[in-house]
Amino acid sequence: MTLTFYDTIAGIYIRPLQMGDSDSLLDLRIRTRSVYADFEPRQYGSFYTLREQ
């Protein structure tokens, strides 16, 4: 997975998501699903598919 972070004088800049980021976003969501379970709304299992991203 590749996300682009820019360390600038004003702080860290994270570029907005683009259509081509869906594979990486899905991978990130699956890998961190249990970590953020207490802080994110519950999702149906189909949410964690490429089609839903």
Image (cartoon, grey):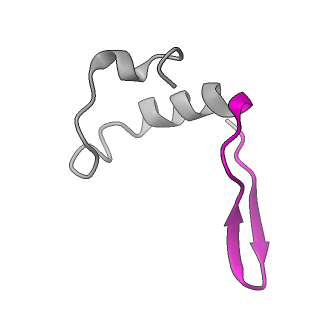
Relative horizontal placement of residue 24, taking residue 31 as reference (left or right): right
Give the quadrant of residue 19: top right
Determine the residue located farthest toward the bottom in the rendered image: 9
Left-right relation of 30 to 11: left
Residue 53 drawn above or below residue 41 = above
| Image quarter of residue 30 | top left
Percent position (x, y) of residue 20?
73, 29
| Residue at the spot 72% in from the left edge and 40% down from the top edge | 2
- The spot of residue 51 in percent (x, y) is 52, 14
18 falls in the magenta region:
yes
- Place of residue 36 in the rendered image (x, y in percent of width and height, measured from the top left): 31, 47
Q: Which residue occupies 71% across, 38% down?
A: 18
Which of these two is toward me, 6 or 22? 22
In the image, what residue occupies the spot 67% across and 35% down?
1
Which residue: 47% across, 20% down? 52
Does residue 37 show up magenta in the picture? no
Instruction: Note whether 24 is above or below 51 in the view shown.
Output: below
> Count of labels shown?
0
State the extent of the magenta-drawn residues as a range. 2-20
* In the image, residue 6 above or below residue 33: below
Front-most of residues 35 and 25: 25
Q: Is residue 2 left or right of residue 38?
A: right
Q: Quadrant of residue 12?
A: bottom right
Residue 27 image offset from top left, x and y in percent? 54, 29
> In this image, 39 relative to 25: left or right?
left
